[in-house]
Amino acid sequence: MTDNTRVLIFDTTLRDGEQSPGATMTHDEKLEIAQALDEMGVDIIEAGFPIASEGDFEAVSDIAKNAKNSVICGLSRANFKDIDRCWEAVKHAPKPRIHTFIGTSPSHRGITNLDQEQMIERIQQTVTHARNLCEDVQWSAMDAIRTERDYLCRVVETAIKAGATTINIPDTVGYTLPQESADIIRMLLEKVPGADEIVFATHCHNDLGMATANALAAVAAGARQIECTINGLGERAGNTALEEVVMAMKVRRDLMPYTTGIDTTKIMNLSRRVAQVSGFPVQFNKAIVGKNAFLHESGIHQDGVLKNVETFEIMKPADIGITETNIAMGKHSGRAALRSKLKDLGFDLADNQLNDVFVRFKALADRKKEIYDEDLIALMSDSAANT
Ligand code: KIV
Ligand code: ZN
């Protein structure tokens, strides 16, 4: 990659996201989400784990056949059978990628029953095999963060020599903190021969609520691919949320001078659709895509944003595709917000009329948690009937 400020967005909603217990999506839903990710400008779509089931294989292969601009990637463990199955599924894509991984930390080596040297050999053989099938090969050191640093350098060097073009450094259990996330990428770039020839990826989980911060720290240290999911969907506490890292880099260009290919105006619609098809609703106060992320209810905030929107908003709702009003009417709302809201609904009131409606609005808001447009229209009809 020539432009060193460009960060690739690798979306794994359809693979790591779908691994959330209960988030299974149908074949058609996966195709629809993949198409939307492609249209939104996602660079790489991890479409599934082809060996996991016949359904996963079919989904990855149909997504590959329908891909337009995105690279289509499938996941495979470190064995030839998985890698061959993955290739069979992704090979239909205009830009296919094989992603193969192995757990490199002491506990994961214990599970695979491989000592350090045997694992090096396995990585060498499997990455070489993948590279003989496909030009674009990503290799992941699962649980990289808890892998001994010297050994991590050795496995990464092995994968690069065997032909991996992207090296992913996952925080599989969401254990790291920003400082460490950055230090590891910096260390690999400094110590591993050939590290400047490949792309380093960061893949964070959110067990300590650090996934976004850790991903951004890795980018600041030199990683150029962020692995993420829509709404942060993913195993346990989820993965890095695509909308958070993309908007953080857009809003804080001064501190994070990087670009992505994402059309951010498509974020909100896709977030809503992923919530629907996965059955995982988005929490109201979720950053960027939560129902309340751009809503103002208190009188002081409403008055502020009506006079100058920058008082309480650091980004424009339209930038992520929100077209609805940013004013929530409730018992904390003030006169300015009520006047503005009624004006939007077609009622332009004189001061004395507004006073009367405001008193009745406050009485209603004390009884009712949320005030909808219909409630305000009903208040106005009562008011007309009483005059
Ligand atoms: O979290 C993880 O380590 C993964 C790998 C399979 C990349 O999802
Ligand atoms: Zn993961």
Image (cartoon, rainbow, N blue to C red):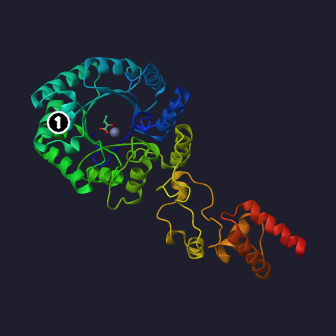
Q: Nearer the viewer, residue 244 or 146?
A: 146
Tally of marks: 1
Location of residue 171 (image quadrant):
top left
Rendered location of residue 19, percent (x, y): 41, 35
Rendered location of residue 52, percent (x, y): 39, 24
Q: Which residue is mark 1?
A: 156
Location of residue 195 (image quadrant):
top left
| Quarter occupied by the N terminus | top left
The answer, for residue 105, to whether it is visible in the render is: no
Q: Would you say 239 lies left or right of 386 here?
A: left
- 251 lies above or below 274: below
Residue sitting at 31 percent across and 26 percent down? Answer: 76
Label 1: element kind: helix
Residue sitting at 87 percent across and 71 percent down? Answer: 384
| Quarter occupied by the C terminus | bottom right
Rendered location of residue 360, percent (x, y): 76, 75
Q: Quadrant of ligand 2?
A: top left
Q: Residues within 10 Å of mark 1 (few under 14, many from 20)?
A: many
Amino acid type at mark 1 = Val
Q: Would you say 65 lies left or right of 163 here?
A: right
Residue sitting at 42 percent across and 52 percent down? Answer: 244
Q: Would you say 324 lies left or right of 290 here?
A: right
Rendered location of residue 146, percent (x, y): 20, 44
- 27 lies above or below 311: above
Q: Would you say 129 lies left or right of 226 here?
A: left
Q: Nearer the viewer, residue 321 or 139?
A: 139
Indicate if the residue with disc 1 has its beta carbon within 8 Å of ligand 1. Answer: no
The answer, for residue 47, to whether it is visible in the render is: yes
